[in-house]
Image: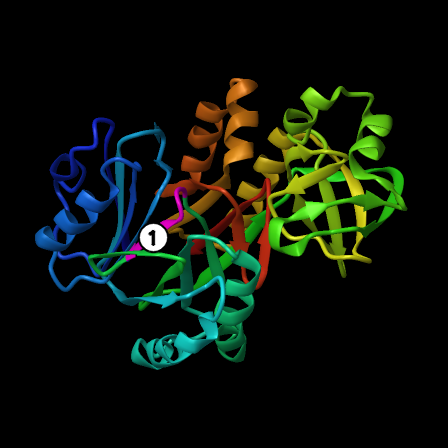
Amino acid sequence: MRQFFGMSQSGDLKEAVRGLSNPQVILLISNNEQFEFHVKELEKLFPQVPSIGCIGMSYDTRIVEKGVGIIAFLDGVSATANVLEQVSTMPVKYIKRLEQDVYKVNASQENTVCIDFCSGNDACVLTTIYSVLKHHRIPLVGGTGDAGKISANGRVYQDAVAYALIKNNNGRVKAYKENIYHKMGNYSFIASRTDKANYMLGELNGRPAKQVYQDILHVSEHEISTQTFKNPFGKVNGNDTCIISIKEVNGNALTCFRQVNDSDVLIMLELGDYKATVRNTIQTIQRDFSRVSAVFSVNCLFRYLLFSDNNYMQQYLQEMSALGNHVGFVGYGEHYNNQFVNQSMTCVVFE
């Protein structure tokens, strides 16, 4: 199989698809102003080709911040794309679509991945999608786009998740998740006074969440929203830790980028040696695959900002390109199987 990446910093879709022929499935990453136009134009250029899209930044060895990026899979790929609607209230209403698509491509654990672009309510969406995928042990990698819009097969949707099932007919696929944070000290908190609908964290161990965060890290209220780049919260899930980013201060509470529930046990995390972590991820993939056809990744916006602030983003993309054809997009939340995480990188590798 092959992976194609085309881009235009100015948002010229025809420039971005130059050289692309006979794609089996297309991923569109566009800007807010041109997204709907690009969705319609892409359908005209490649009618009947399965496609999903979202608003965000894309990359290969370069980053496309405001233009358009096109990722396509071809040569030895079977694929289908679809959408689950009403994700804020009842995504399970449309689950038959996914069940039928799994059988349509004859999906299996060894050679199929589900890539999704979501408009929001990620945790519920992933629970719904994974209720089907888990029976076939099909991995999922994806993320949240901007502006509450996604596309599937030439149509724009709100309050929805678009997905593509991609089967590698000539080799394996495997999903990975990268965490550049580790536990800080012995801090452990019981969350309370949470507002699940608004991702609000009111208290930690019975004290205002804002005050607890400030007291531990000695930061001002103004600094909290950027301090989360170095010190997010973590929710322990077995042997795994789900990262929880802070979005903003709301009175004495903290608004997060993922849901926190009453009685959840949280820990404080701190940034580790992210360059060493990236090198370890690359080495792990190289050990698992002697031959890599393509790598598709989703990087959190906060990772992008952190890497950019430390003049590492361009070096990161160059290092990842050592794996072969590496492309992806910058999301507002990352999906890994049934997990919705923040400040992480998830990816799928195609043999």
Q: Please indicate whether residue 197 sits to the left or right of residue 289 in the image.
A: right
Q: Residue at x 76, y 61 (%)?
A: 238
Q: At which x and y percent is residue 11? A: 21, 32
Which segment is the magenta one?
146-151
Q: Quadrant of residue 94?
A: bottom left
Residue 157 or 136: which is nearer the viewer? 157
- Does residue 16 appear in this view? yes
Q: Residue at x 70, y 37 (%)?
A: 232
**On the image, numbered disc 1 is attached to which residue?**
150
Residue 187 or 91: which is nearer the viewer? 91
Q: Is residue 58 above or below residue 110?
A: above
Q: At which x and y percent is residue 107? A: 38, 75
- Does residue 351 appear in this view? no
Q: Is residue 150 magenta?
A: yes
Q: Quadrant of residue 267?
A: top right
Q: Is residue 337 magenta?
A: no
Q: Please indicate whether residue 22 sits to the left or right of residue 286 in the image.
A: left
Circle 1 SS class: strand
Q: Where, quadrant-wise, is the N terminus in this rendering?
A: bottom left
Q: Residues within 10 Å of mark 1 (few under 14, many from 20)?
A: many
Q: Please indicate whether residue 174 sits to the left or right of residue 254 in the image.
A: left
Q: Where, quadrant-wise, is the C terminus in this rendering?
A: bottom left
- Amino acid of disc 1: Ile
Q: At which x and y percent is residue 215? A: 86, 27
Q: Quadrant of residue 271?
A: top right
Q: At which x and y percent is residue 208? A: 83, 38
